[in-house]
């Protein structure tokens, strides 16, 4: 099939592009390169530089008669979204509505959306299943929820079928080593730990060690990007075969604390990770875990690369290689 991947040069998008092409699909990447990296573009893909904020760019690229759009182009820093909601409204909301409208104009019927567990907000129970209330705790999560609602309406009114995939904590790098460029402006724990281990920063903060968890630090559910990529392909196949909309979680249900990540990184890298324990951040829950039974039941998906060792080793390899390349340049 012919597939358009917005944000396909970014961290998650580049992994999805590789998986789609491995499965023999014809892929076009559409990216404004604000967060994308040239070195992460699969050479087998067609690349088009453009913005979802420009309808002319979208109409031009959508002339290619795609069967499916996979949409990942978005800003994604939760903290920043609270400081600059206008930026997130413009890019995430307006950009996505522009893309949906372009799909309708060009007759593209299937839409895979990169949503987020941020739509749930503070957990009322764990593991979080799809029946959990959706009450976002930040504006980033609100943009994801509003896009899901827009897709629901466009499905009813215009027949665009969609899958909204609610990621938990995406992490890791391609297990085959094909993605070489580090994620741009990372906000998540594992890249920050890697920056300390690789000497890019001297130390890091651990926000709270008084949670009701095994070691007092926050617990999260980390899902390897290769597993996310596989889920996108399976969700796309389901959407086309069944011709019904799909909303589901993508996670592992496995607990991983901040100190687990730090200890494993020290073990893998052989370097110490200096950290300071500071107070909790407002709104940070102690434990966030995914309930992903629906993904298992409907699309026969299960994560195979999301153990902590693979997550850390695949990430450390990228950071180590980048450090060697910088030293040689």
Image: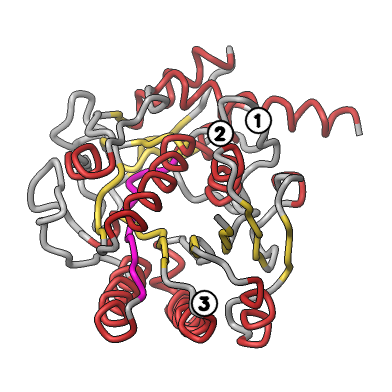
Q: Residue at x 65, y 42 (%)?
A: 182
Locate residue 42, reporting x and y percent.
70, 45
Q: How was the colour assigned to the protein in this rendering? A: secondary structure
| Front residue of 291 and 323 | 291
Label 3 vs 1, first from the N-terminus: 3
- Are the residues at dot 3 and dot 1 in contact (C-beta closer than 8 Å)? no
The reply to whether the magenta stretch includes residue 328 is no
Locate residue 88, reporting x and y percent.
46, 75
- The residue singled out by tag 1 in the image is 318
- The residue singled out by tag 2 in the image is 173
Quarter the N terminus occupies: bottom right
- Are the residues at dot 2 and dot 1 in contact (C-beta closer than 8 Å)? yes
Give the main secondary structure, helix, strand or loop, of the magenta stretch: strand
| Front residue of 82 and 308 | 308
Locate residue 132, reporting x and y percent.
11, 56
Distance from disc 3 to disc 1, alpha carbons, whole Å, reads 29 Å
**How many discs appear?**
3
Q: Tag 1's secondary structure?
A: helix
- The residue singled out by tag 3 in the image is 91
Res 209 seen here: yes
Q: Tag 2's secondary structure?
A: loop
């Amino acid at each position: 099939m012919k597939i358009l991947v917005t944000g396909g040069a970014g961290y998650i998008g580049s992994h999805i592009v590789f998986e789609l092409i491995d499965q023999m699909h014809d892929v076009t990447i559409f990216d404004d390169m604000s967060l994308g990296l040239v070195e992460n573009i699969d050479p087998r893909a067609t690349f088009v530089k453009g913005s979802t904020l420009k309808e002319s760019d979208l109409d031009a690229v959508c002339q290619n008669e795609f069967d499916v759009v996979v949409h990942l182009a978005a800003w994604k820093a939760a903290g920043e979204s609270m400081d600059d909601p206008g930026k997130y409204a413009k890019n995430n909301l307006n950009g996505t509505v522009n893309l949906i409208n372009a799909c309708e104009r060009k007759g593209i019927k299937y839409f895979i959306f990169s949503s987020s567990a941020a739509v749930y907000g503070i957990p009322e129970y764990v593991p979080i299943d799809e029946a959990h209330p959706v009450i976002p705790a930040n504006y980033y999560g609100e943009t994801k929820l509003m896009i899901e609602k827009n897709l629901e309406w466009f499905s009813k009114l215009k027949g665009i079928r969609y899958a909204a995939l609610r990621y938990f904590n995406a992490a890791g790098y391609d297990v085959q080593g094909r993605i070489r460029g580090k994620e741009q402006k990372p906000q998540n724990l594992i890249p920050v730990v890697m920056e300390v281990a690789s000497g890019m920063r001297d130390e890091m903060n651990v926000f709270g060690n008084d949670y009701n968890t095994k070691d007092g630090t926050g617990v999260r559910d980390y899902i390897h990007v290769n597993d996310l990529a596989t889920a996108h392909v399976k969700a796309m196949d389901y959407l086309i075969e069944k011709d019904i909309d799909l909303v589901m979680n993508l996670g592992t249900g496995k607990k991983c604390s901040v100190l687990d990540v730090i200890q494993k990184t020290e073990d893998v890298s052989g370097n110490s990770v200096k950290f300071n324990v500071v107070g909790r951040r407002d709104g940070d829950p102690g434990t966030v875990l995914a309930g992903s039974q629906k993904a298992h039941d409907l699309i026969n998906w299960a994560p195979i690369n999301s153990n902590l060792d693979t997550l850390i080793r695949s990430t450390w390899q990228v950071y180590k290689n980048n450090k060697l390349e910088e030293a040689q340049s």
